[in-house]
Image (cartoon, rainbow, N blue to C red):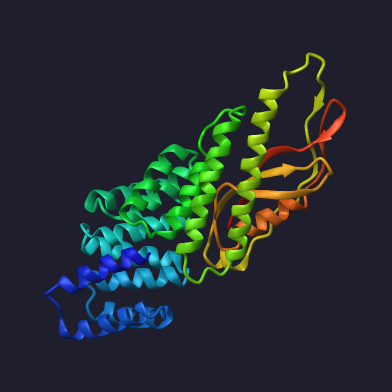
Amino acid sequence: MKNLRNILILFFVSSTIVFAQSQTGRDKGIEFYEQADYKNAIKVLKEAAKAEPADHTVHHYLGLSLMNENKLKDAEKAFERAIKLNPNFAGSQTGLAYIYLRRDKLKSAAETAEKAVALDGRNAEAYFVLSSVYLRSGNADRALENTEQAIKLDPNFASAHLLKAHSLMNLSLTNQDYKNRSVRYGTAGDSIGKFITLSKNLSNIGFWQKQRETLKFFADYYTEREKNRSAVAPSADDSSTPVKILNKKPAGYTEKARQASVSGFIRLLVAFSEDGTIKHVLALNSLGFGLDEEAIDAAKDIKFEPATKDGRPVTVVKTIEYTFSIY
């Protein structure tokens, strides 16, 4: 939410009507927020909100601080209060839309993000939320459209480049369109590279580097499938059997995800190798908070019988899904 924060700072600086008592508390709370000291920011901003309940900026920063502490229900209330006090501030609408997205309330997230865009057409974060909603809803084309708009507005928006990669991976293609699938996976790999380069203090950089390498594997896989189709005419007596999954254990749920109340699903592209092992797994979307890694680890433990062609085991690619819910 870096750009959202910058917008809010500009708005705050331009505001000329303040109350001395709340100004001190508000300034201190915002200072704590800027220092990423969210616990103290929450404490000070709550007091400022009591002193000046009509100050929407206080409630807004309180919402941002609560969101960073994964207190989503309280953050939702703070943003709603800020919007009630100033419904024309796009930053509050975007913050609330992001909370709805985190809580998997996709319809509310989309409606609120649309309001933010209507108020501020240069709000990259609002386009990011819209793209996330479209991707989770299975509309990768609209997801890519909104992600590219977010990147156009802010080329250094790291998470938007990652979302673009996932949008490219999920674009509708026929099962036999190997060439375009290979090209799109290659482009998605470039986007993940930009995400890695632009991200600061990326704790799981090794995971994303591995995912970039996995994208190259699948791009090469589909390139090879295209070559084989062009070189070998199908035989009338070809026989084959599909891969048979024998055991698929559920993926683990991380404590970080639990604290953040994250729900949703992760779709994976899995290469079921001819030798009965799974080495390459690609996350087609991301929930974060360690859930991507949990899903991939679970997929690698799947027990299966390889597919066969003309009686010989062969490597095939299938899409599988893991669902994560808060109970």
User: Which percent across, then down, holds residue 251?
Assistant: 69, 55
- Residue at point 53% right, 68% down? 202
User: Which percent across, then down, holds residue 135?
Assistant: 48, 44
The residue at the far front in this view is 231
The residue at the far right in this view is 311
- Residue at point 61% right, 48% down? 215
Image quarter where the C terminus lies is bottom right
- Residue at point 26% right, 80% down? 26
Q: Is residue 54 visible?
A: no
Q: Is residue 141 visible?
A: yes
- Residue at point 52% right, 40% down? 184
User: Which percent across, then down, holds residue 175?
Assistant: 61, 29
Q: Quadrant of residue 34?
A: bottom left
Asked if residue 295 lies left or right of residue 170, the reply is right
Image quarter where the N terminus lies is bottom left
Asked if residue 118 lies left or right of residue 131, the reply is left
As displayed, is residue 136 above or below residue 287?
above
As displayed, is residue 235 above or below residue 161?
above
242 and 201: which is toward the camera: 201
As displayed, is residue 174 above or below residue 41?
above
